Structure formats: C-alpha cells, structure tokens
Amino acid sequence: MFDALLRPALLSASRSSRVERTVTALSSTRKLVDRFVAGESEPHAAAATRSLLDSGRLVTIDHLGEDTTDLIRARTNVDHYLELLRTLREMRESTGIVRPLEVSLKLSALGQSLPGDGHAAALEHAHLICSAAATAGVWVTVDAEDHTTTDSTLAIVRELRADFPWLGTVLQAYLRRTESDCREFSGVGSRIRLCKGAYREPASVAFQARAEVDRSYLRCLDILMHGQGYPMVATHDPALIEAAGHSARAAERRAGEFEFQMLYGIRDEEQRRLVTDGQQLRVYVPYGDQWYGYFMRRLAERPANLAFFLRSLRPANRR
Ligand SMILES: Cc1cc2nc3c(=O)[nH]c(=O)nc-3n(C[C@H](O)[C@H](O)[C@H](O)COP(=O)(O)OP(=O)(O)OC[C@H]3O[C@@H](n4cnc5c(N)ncnc54)[C@H](O)[C@@H]3O)c2cc1C
C-alpha cells in the first residue's frame, strides 16, 4: 500500500505548490522538519556542522532550493552558497580541520530549469560556486534530480571537472542508465555518490521494484569500488551498508579509500557506529527555508516518517 499508493502520491505532492502552501502553513509540520533540516540560515548550518565534526563525522552542506524558475531566486541561491563557503573557510582556518568539508548543490536551484538557456545559467552559477569552494578549500558535489535533468547535469559536471577535477557527482541506482554512467565516471580522481534515487520516475527509465533497485545498487557499487575514483556510499539500508564493506574488501580498498554517507537526522546511532568502527561517514546537512520538496521526499521514503507526521496533525497536538 505504501509503495504502490502513498509513496507516488507524496512524490507528486512534493511538486505541487497548492499542497506546499497547505503543508508549510501547518505549525505542526515544523517539529518534523526540524528532525531533517538543520535550520534556516548559515549560522544554523555552521552549528550543526561543528557538532557533527566534533563527533568524528564529515559533512556535506546543502542550501535547500530546487526547481527555481526565476533568475533572481537563482542568484540569491548562489549568494547563499558564497556566504556558506565564507563561513566554512573561517571554520577551517580557525579549527585546522584537515579532511575536506563539502557542499552539495542542486543545479535546478541555480537556474537549470529557467526558460531559455537554463543549462548555461546553471553552468555559470555552479562555476562561480566551485571557484569560491576552491579558494575556501571545500569540495563540491552536484546532486542528482529527476531523470529529465540527468543529461544536462552530467554534461555540466564533465565541463566543470576540466577546471575542478575534485568535483563530485551523484548517480541514482534506480535509473536503468546508471551502470553505464558509473563506468564512465569511475576514472581517476572522480568522486561519485551512489544513492538509490528519490524522485518519482517512469518504468521506461527507472527500476520500480525495491529488489531491482537494490540489485542495481550492488552492481553499481562493484563498478565504483573496482574503479579508480572515490566511491561515496549514500544509504541507510543495513543490507547495502554491509555489502559495501564486502565490496570494498574485494576491491582491496581500505577504510579511507571510500566513505559512507547518510542524511541529517536519520539513523544517528548507525552513523556513530560506523565512525567507531573506523569508517569515514559524511552527513548530508540541509538548511534554508525552501525545505518543502526535501521534506516531502523524506516522508515518501519511510512509512514511519509519514505516520509520525500524520500523528502530529491530530487536534490534540495542534497549538
Ligand atoms: C548523503 C545522501 C545524499 C543523497 N543525495 C541524493 C541525490 O542527490 N539525489 C537523489 O535522488 N537522492 C539522494 N539521496 C536519497 C536517496 O536516493 C534515497 O532516497 C534515500 O537515501 C533513502 O534510500 P536508502 O538507501 O536509505 O534506503 P531505503 O530503501 O529508504 O531504506 C532502506 C532501509 O534502511 C533503513 N532505514 C531507512 N531510514 C531509516 C530510519 N530513519 N531509521 C531507521 N532505519 C532506516 C530501514 O531498514 C529501511 O528498510 C541521498 C541520500 C543520502 C544518504
């Protein structure tokens, strides 16, 4: 019932401005949003980052925003990244953090879906952010969005990597094309985050059954682990986390030669366990006021998250 009906409905709702107005107006939504989102501004993101770094975890920080259809909003999103990178630079210099901090960005927040030449606008904006990140000593990874953006996103990543060879990108195991993309992107110096994929996609381009997605994830993982790049294993799934350990050993990779990644607020104990076991673990820390799409995708991932949200709507819980 959840996978067949509720998940697709929630993912459709994640792109509806009418539902967005209703959900964001509910005061009870805020409590659950706070579990998944680090706050609204750069100081909030910085505070969450410090606390995660103190616990031995790495971070990648995302200024929330997507599907931007006006240029002013796209430029404002760029400004937020430039401010964030200034904050991270100061933090790096004052604390002497050696292992690279990272920011994650969505090209649709930078103008990729603007009418006219959104592709060129996103490329220009991402180039600005990567230049600032290089100065700050911070890595960048480009998130993956719905499949209609994949060709444009990977073309932008190819172009940016000529100037910023450390640029990472995300590949989604649910897409049928991803095994072949993993082969292309597993060369020297590449950093690839492999995730299952979080959007509603048609069967023509994406595996639909969970078991098929998991099998694709394992095939992609093997390609990345045996490749020459740096695999970033983004999942909360215990079976895939265990499989990643086996795959790394089979490819003779040590703990520092790949990393696990999880989302802020999800499986905190498991995050700490991996660190205690000597693994590198990076937490994806989203912040900002455009949290609606991100929040709805988290509700669509897990019946327990949706149940918690629905319980919070009961009249007794309303303030
Ligand atoms: C760092 C990171 C970056 C990402 N970036 C992108 C991106 O750029 N593009 C994109 O499309 N998607 C992205 N995603 C989201 C991803 O595609 C999945 O939607 C999301 O991670 C859920 O898939 P899963 O692999 O965790 O497995 P799921 O199938 O959601 O969960 C599998 C199992 O994990 C366990 N589990 C999951 N959540 C919990 C929980 N809260 N508590 C306890 N157990 C739990 C349960 O055992 C569950 O059955 C990213 C995910 C991560 C972790």
Image (spheres, rainbow, N blue to C red):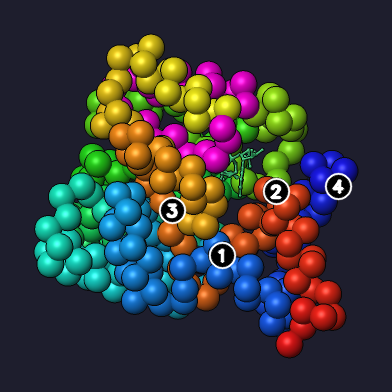
Helix, strand or loop at mark 4: helix
Which residue is labeled 4 in the image? 5
The answer to whether residue 95 is left or right of residue 111 is: left
The answer to whether residue 126 is left or right of residue 205 is: left
Instruction: Tell me which label, 4 or 3, sits earlier in the chain.
Output: 4
Residue at left offset 44%, top offset 17%: 246
Q: Is the Cβ of the residue at disc 4 closer than 8 Å to that at disc 1?
A: no
Residue type (three-letter) at the residue carrying disc 1: Arg
Instruction: Tell me which label, 3 or 1, sits earlier in the chain.
Output: 1
Which segment is the magenta one?
214-238
Instruction: Give the alpha-carbon distance from disc 3 to disc 1, as whole Å.
Output: 13 Å
- Give the mark toward the camera: 3 or 1: 1
Instruction: Give the alpha-carbon distance from disc 2 to disc 1, as whole Å.
Output: 14 Å
Which residue is labeled 1 in the image? 35
Q: Give whichever of 206, 60 is nearer the camera.
A: 60
How packed mark 4 is, by other alpha carbons closer than 10 Å (few <14, some 14-19, many 20 or more), is: few
Instruction: Give the alpha-carbon distance from disc 2 to disc 3, as whole Å.
Output: 18 Å
Residue 47 placement: quadrant: bottom left
- In which quadrant will I find the N terminus? top right
Q: Give whichever of 175, 155 is nearer the camera.
A: 175
User: What percent of the width, then of the height, locates residue 101?
Assistant: 26, 53
- Give the mark toward the camera: 4 or 3: 3
Q: Is residue 258 visible?
A: yes
Which residue is labeled 2 in the image? 302
Which residue is labeled 3 in the image? 284
